[in-house]
Amino acid sequence: MSKVVNVLQVLQGAGVLSTTDTARQTRSVLQNAAEDHAKAETPYGRVVQLMHFEGLEEPWEYCEPRAYLRYLSTLNDSYGETMKNYSNGSTLQVVMYLDEIVPGNPFRQDQGRKIYGVYWACLEWPGWLLARSGFWPVLGIMKSKTIHDKLPGGVSAFWKHIVGLFKDGIHVQVVYKEERIPFTLKYAGTMADEDALKASNSFKGASGIKMCMDCKALINTTDDSLLPPGTWSLNATSLKDRARNTNEDIWRAADSLHQLASNGRAYHERSKELGLTYNPRGILWDVSLRHIHKPIESYIRDWMHIWVSGGVCNSQIFGLKGALKDNGIPISIVRTFSLEVILPKQYGTVSAAWLDDNRFSDNDFSSFASYQLTLVPIIGAFLEDCVKPHNIMIEHISCFLLLVQIIGLLSSGADYAVQHMPLLATLIVDHHKLYVQLYPHLVKPKFHHILHLPELYVRLQKVISCFVAISCSGILFIYVYGVDRF
């Protein structure tokens, strides 16, 4: 709220806005307008409605998808026209996005204000539209402390209620001028980082022996000497001929834990073997949702979190720094090279802080994803132009240039990128083979999850990521409820 008020005050001071409102008055106007929109009535009820959770005293306020779409279409003909062009009479597949965020200054986070934000979008919408934050509507937000400390069943119980909104499909009519545009919203899956996907599905993830529920015999280790017969490790560079789990396999595992617990028998060791955390209030144990939430197909990995948000790209840049140092090339030279690069105006300028020495520690490179998306091609250009001519570090350069191609392909748009999944699969296997040779100490669970991306996007017929939603109207949703709650 404060940032919006500040911007409006600056515009007012520049004579762009014909108002003499003080900052306090402007804040009040925005607050009242947000509350009015939240209370707007539609054929599906108010835009903001209440959801009740067992164990929580206060109901949760959320933005009802049907009411939201209908109301927006009455406010803006362009919105209604877009819905007509891409939704008329169709069944649209809804991807939900769950993310835990801290509002405010990312460099000075107040963990007590941490919240879970819930967003959504439809796969049938075109790529150019999915790349716009305004078309990832906010369903709602809830304080992390409330979910973890007060809600029985935690994140998975919370998510069970969210998915339940789409239990029977949601039939919607929006308006475009005098025309009614009908369509149906159908849940297609949950996109999130690995922590949120693990928590919402009650998977143990990287903390368990089985860190990937897709793969039957994958063991969470990089030491191949520890592998039991018939299993494989995180070092694997391909999924070819690997045994896979089905949804039914996961449900049988969940049911077996429930049977043990119901009979009063110990289930903790079995839980470790299966890779599941027994949570009878969680989504896997809600039989009524098994026809829509499928633990394999509904599990949508986010490529940005896997690659550039504490991901493999971070580790590879760390490993590359060490290789450069071994060849007498300090990271300061790469930093100097990067500062000579002139970016397109909309991307701003390169900062020396992006490759500061303090960002490299503990086998990792600390960086925001947006910085890395800019740095990767710049570092690739440095290696190609300044290092390769000296005929040194050839394999390191080849591995990094594969990374450049992969990130470039994934960033090329939801509709364009999905046309090149065979190429993506080849690039990933080639990259992984070199990576395991060059940086065996930097292999992490996300290294494995990358292997699942091509088949995921073939199934979705879209290459999507969640980072566009982070900049969207999540903070605007806070306005509806008042900043004092957060």
Image: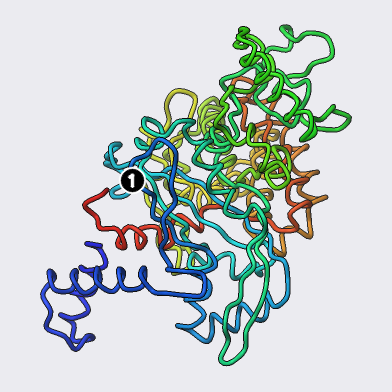
Percent of width and height locating residue 251: 73, 30
The residue lying toward the viewer, choosing from 373 and 111, is 111
Vertical placement of 208 versus 470: above or below? above
Residue situated in front as seen by the camera: 226 or 424: 226
Give the residue number, with chain letter if any, for mark 1.
58
Secondary structure at badge 1 equals loop
Identity of the residue drawn at 66% across and 13% down: 260
Quadrant in which the N terminus appears: bottom left
Q: What residue type is labelled 1?
A: Glu
Report crowding for label 1: few under 14, some 14 to 19, many 20 or more residues within 10 A (C-alpha): few
Determine which quarter of the picture holds residue 290: top right
In this figure, which colouring scheme has been used for the structure? rainbow
6 left or right of 198? left
Relative image position of residue 449 (x, y in whole percent): 67, 35
13 sits left or right of 364 in the view:
left
- At 54% from the left edge and 25% from the top edge, which residue is drawn? 326
Q: Which of 328 and 294 is in front in this view?
A: 294
Write the residue at 74% across / 32% down. Answer: 214
**Image height check: is 203 above or below 338?**
above
Looking at the picture, does residue 280 appear above or below residue 174?
above
Residue 218 screen position, x and y as percent = 74, 21
- Taking 273 as reference, is 354 left or right? left
Q: Farthest residue in the right direction?
A: 241
**Position above or below: 267 against 444:** above
